[in-house]
Amino acid sequence: MEGGKIVLNGDEAKNIAKVLSAFLDDAAFEFKDGKVVVGGFDPSRVVYILAEITDGVFDEGGGKYGVNLSQLKKVLNRAKKKDDVTIEFSNDKIKVTIEGTMKRTFVLPIVSAEEVQEVDVSNLPLNAMFSVGAKELYEIIKDAKLVTDAVKFIVKDGIVTIKASGDINEFEATFDDLEEVDGEAEAMYSVSFLEDFLKNIGSADLTVRLGTEAPMVAEAELMNGRITFLLAPRVEE
């Protein structure tokens, strides 16, 4: 018998659904090797997003279950921070139970979804790395959005600089006191995709890796797992 369930707190469940639904319409939750993986490429294939849930997973036979992420997000948005959220998967339905001061249950249909695509980022030329809070970086990206639709990340000499140049305006922000900065790289990325990721990931700490004119990979460690965000570079004209 196939099936399984995930148990998360309210905030974690909402953040996972929000960040996935920002880029994907439908996705398959796959039980394997004691964890759940869900993700894939966005329609433009500029972004790859993957959530790995490693704690609170109860595998009762495995399998893959297609979910409409917009519907799931709407349901999970009803959970409060301290609520317990249980998502149960079976061959014909998904049952979401939210328990706090009262118990509420929602039933969603299984939908058709592509299999989870896992990308090996170890072969990408990512020569630089830094760690930063998602909320801090989100504020910088919102500033850059006032100027243009693309930002340049420069990592050099232990300093991370983010620049944006419009037709008449310019913006620059510098992180010179981050504890973990390594390597050198320079690349440009879309503001809108970064904004969609950062505003939905919550207050997570990020490990960001990038290379010169190469993709950016940002990993967010969660209480119950990890989210990996890969963004293709914007080619400078």
Image (cartoon, grey):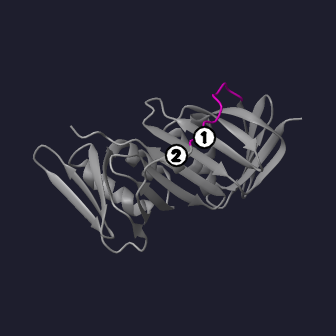
User: Farthest right residue?
Assistant: 1
Q: CA distance from mark 2 to mark 1?
A: 17 Å
Question: Which secondary structure lies at badge 1?
Answer: loop
On the image, numbered disc 2 is attached to which residue? 19
In terms of image quadrants, where is residue 10? bottom right
Q: Main secondary structure of the magenta part?
A: loop
Which quarter of the rendering shows the N terminus?
top right
In the rendered image, residue 186, in percent from the top left (x then y), is placed at 30, 54
Q: Where does the magenta region start and end?
A: 110-119
| Dot 2 amino acid type | Val
Residue at x-position 63% and y-position 62%:
223
Question: Which secondary structure lies at badge 2?
Answer: helix
Magenta-colored stretch includes residue 116: yes
In the rendered image, residue 221, in percent from the top left (x then y), is placed at 57, 60
On the image, numbered disc 1 is attached to which residue? 118
In the rendered image, residue 28, in percent from the top left (x then y), is placed at 66, 34
Left or right: residue 184 compared with residue 135: left
